[in-house]
Image: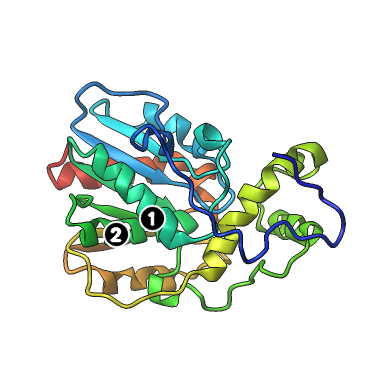
Amino acid sequence: MSVSIEPGKRIFESNDLLVTQNQDGGSRWFYIPQPVVRPRLRLYCFPYAAGSPALFRDWTVLLPGTVEMRAVTLPGRGLQADARPICNLKVLSGHIAKAVAAHSDTHFAFFGHSMGALLAFETTRELRRRGSMQPVHLFLSACHAAHRFSENRATVENMTNEEFITHLGRLAGTPREILNDRQLMEILLPSLKADFLALDRWRYEADRPLNVPITAIAGRDDEAVGTEAVREWQQHTNMDFNFTAVAGDHFFVTSAPEPLVELISRTLRNDAWL
């Protein structure tokens, strides 16, 4: 895939809402660094916008040995590097739900950070619509509750490529050495921008609360997402709800993964899933 990054040129136009097809039953949707034979539980991890599934690679040594971690891999990166990016969150959640349902031989939980939290939530609702097994727990991290998600968001729909790269730099979630590598960014821009376009174009649709426990997690120093907006995920479950504030800014998922994984493990253990 080659995309010119000429100043003022935009990568995506309105007709780029494309759907990718898998020929392998959905396995390309998941990066599994350490497969577990007959796991007691699978933890599906959804990365933030422009995030790589590899950011969860080290979680395998932090999780209990009976848990298999599967990081969601979106089109245009990782195992799906040859697939066209998708700029539609509902389409993505449909594909992921189908892939999860095809591998639902054991119980599973979802963890999502920022955009990943919203995608995990939508995937859970899609599983419910399909009558498929749903996660035993939702861990939603650094994300406004769904009904508040679009409040005060900077959109990228009309940004040029240069403006978008500057925007990524301000968010501080993409390493500076990657942003400064023009050849690498030429390859990565379509998939990175697709994530943000999917968020820009998504609109919350009210539905009944989930019958899935939710743990909402906020960073105490997160200037992008306030703790009260995260706490409002309580409105989206009929089951147990827990809210936790942890040390760190918006990207505590990478700066301090140990206490985060411990929280997930402890919660699942207390619920007798481990």
Amino acid identity at mark 1: Ser
Q: From what the image shows, is residue 60 above or below residue 141? A: above
Distance from the alpha carbon under mark 2 to that under mark 1: 7 Å
Query: Residue 190 or 60: which is nearer the viewer?
Result: 190
Residue 27 shown left or right of residue 38 in the figure: right
Q: Where in the figure is residue 105, as x and y percent of width and height?
A: 17, 35
Total number of numbered labels?
2
Give the number of the disc on residue 126.
2
Give the number of the disc on residue 93.
1
Q: Is tag 2's residue or tag 1's residue first in the polypeptide sequence? A: 1
Callout 1: SS: helix
Callout 2: SS: helix
Residue 223 shows in the view? yes
Q: Quadrant of the C terminus?
A: top left
Amino acid identity at mark 2: Glu
Q: Quadrant of residue 119?
A: bottom left
The residue under the point 38% across, 29% down is 60
The residue under the point 57% across, 46% down is 84
